[in-house]
Image (cartoon, rainbow, N blue to C red):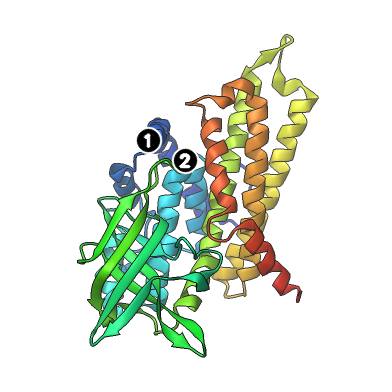
């Protein structure tokens, strides 16, 4: 394993622990869970016992208070084996826990965070709707204040960690009025079991089939006013800040998937014999593997640099956008070449390459499409 200037000995030891867990606990079940489109509460709780949730949460709330790079290494190593489990961890940490810690009241933190650190409860972040995603201002879900309550109506779609038995609730973005002719967006916490709130599992996914994805419905759902996260009208800012950090974890999934695809390709190329020789000895295959290694190295350094900037209180939104964009695209390229190396074998289940080829496709869409990220980066250039 190559050393990296951003990594400490503690980071390297953490990587070994996570890799061992992923290979021993996740790998034996990944193909079956994917085939059945089944979210595993058992694996989620095991990951909780390993400390994968609440990685950066304060210790007094049940977390580990580790740095961003430690979190990213965990997600990366999980994705090297299974993007679905990596996505579960990433969504709870980046989209569930992080905004509550940053913007929540002490009461909100004490009530929600300790349970989310255990893996016995997950949490969702409700932004996407039929007409809202890249255009966050397109949100149509409304929250009207009635005395000391919010009355919520609307629908959220394609939401991670929203429909399983252990989904604890959602932090959703809703329209809470208008200001200067523009929608006023706010973030509101809604716990599972609240009357008027229901969710249902999304079926027929191409990718991340073992993660929990669902739609959420709010029909005159009434929650206390103090469930407001941050200040009224601050929802857009909370969402953008959350996505900046979340992009690092999506980049980590891309990096891990690419590494897993390359490792599988190296191993397969040494075993597959054609014309009396392992195909790894053919220059055409060697060059493909060399290109994979080069792209992965560049993606890793770009991502780790963004993490370092975040941990050292430097501006990192631009670097997060670059990292997510680049890593999602090299995941596509590496998965494609890995499939070429595996040939027909890679086209059939339960080949890990078949799963990787499907799983990588979301990375160019989730938490900022490649088109939106190019827009974000171009604005830093003043164009």
Q: Earlier in the sequence, mark 1 or mark 2?
A: 1
Disc 1 from disc 2: Cα separation: 10 Å
Q: Is residue 243 left or right of residue 158?
A: right
Q: Could you tell me residue 161's position as x and y percent?
A: 36, 54
Where 157 sits versus 151, above or below? Answer: above
Image position of 244 with respect to 356: above or below: below
Q: Residue at x 66, y 39 (%)?
A: 334
- Residue under label 1, please give it: 33
Q: Looking at the rendering, which quadrant does residue 175 occupy?
A: bottom left
User: Residue 216 appears at what percent x and percent y?
Assistant: 34, 59
Q: Where does the N terminus fall, quadrant-wise?
A: top right
The residue that appears at 36% across and 34% down in the rendered structure is 36
The reply to whether residue 16 is in sight is: no
What residue sits right under mark 2 in the picture?
82
| Position above or below: 253 against 280 | below
Q: Is residue 192 left or right of residue 15?
A: left
Q: Which of the two discs, 1 and 2, sits closer to the camera? A: 1
Kindly check if marks 1 and 2 are in contact, taking CB atoms under 8 A apart as contact: yes
The one nearer the camera, 159 or 230, is 159
Q: Is residue 283 left or right of residue 312?
A: right
| Image quadrant assignment for residue 286 | top right
Residue 296 place in picture, x, y as percent: 66, 46
Residue sitting at x 46%, y 60% = 130
Q: Residue 352: in sight, yes or no?
A: yes
């Amino acid at each position: 394993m190559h050393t990296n200037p951003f990594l400490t000995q503690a980071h390297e030891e953490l990587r070994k622990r996570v890799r061992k867990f992923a290979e021993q606990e996740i790998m034996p079940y990944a193909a079956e869970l994917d085939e059945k489109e089944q979210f595993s509460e058992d694996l989620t709780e095991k990951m909780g016992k390993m400390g994968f949730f609440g990685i950066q949460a304060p210790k007094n709330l049940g977390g580990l208070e580790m740095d961003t790079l430690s979190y990213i290494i965990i997600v990366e190593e999980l994705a090297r084996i299974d993007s679905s489990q990596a996505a579960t961890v990433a969504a709870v940490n980046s989209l569930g826990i992080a905004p509550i810690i940053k913007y929540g009241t002490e009461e909100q933190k004490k009530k929600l965070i300790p349970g989310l650190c255990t893996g016995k409860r997950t949490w969702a972040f409700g932004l996407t709707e039929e007409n809202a995603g890249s255009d966050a201002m397109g949100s149509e879900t409304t929250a009207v204040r009635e005395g000391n309550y919010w009355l919520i109506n609307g629908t959220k779609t394609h939401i991670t960690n929203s429909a399983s038995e252990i989904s604890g609730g959602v932090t959703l973005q809703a329209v809470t009025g208008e200001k200067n002719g523009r929608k006023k967006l706010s973030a509101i916490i809604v716990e599972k079991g609240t009357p008027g709130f229901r969710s249902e599992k999304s079926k027929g996914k191409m990718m991340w089939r073992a993660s929990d994805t669902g739609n959420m419905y709010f029909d005159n759902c009434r929650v206390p006013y103090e469930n407001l996260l941050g200040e009224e009208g601050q929802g857009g800012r909370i969402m953008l800040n959350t996505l900046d950090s979340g992009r690092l974890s999506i980049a980590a999934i891309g990096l891990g998937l690419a590494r897993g695809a390359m490792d599988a390709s190296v191993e397969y190329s040494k075993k597959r014999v054609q014309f009396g020789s392992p195909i790894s000895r053919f220059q055409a295959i060697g060059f493909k593997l060399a290109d994979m290694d080069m792209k992965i190295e560049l993606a890793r350094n770009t991502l780790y640099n963004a993490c370092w900037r975040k941990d050292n209180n430097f501006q990192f939104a631009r670097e997060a956008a670059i990292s997510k964009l680049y890593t999602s695209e090299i995941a596509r390229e590496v998965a494609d070449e890995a499939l070429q190396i595996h040939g027909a074998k890679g086209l059939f289940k339960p080949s890990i390459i078949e799963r990787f080829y499907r799983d990588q496709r979301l990375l160019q869409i989730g938490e900022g499409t490649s088109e939106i990220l190019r827009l974000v980066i171009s604005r830093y250039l003043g164009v």
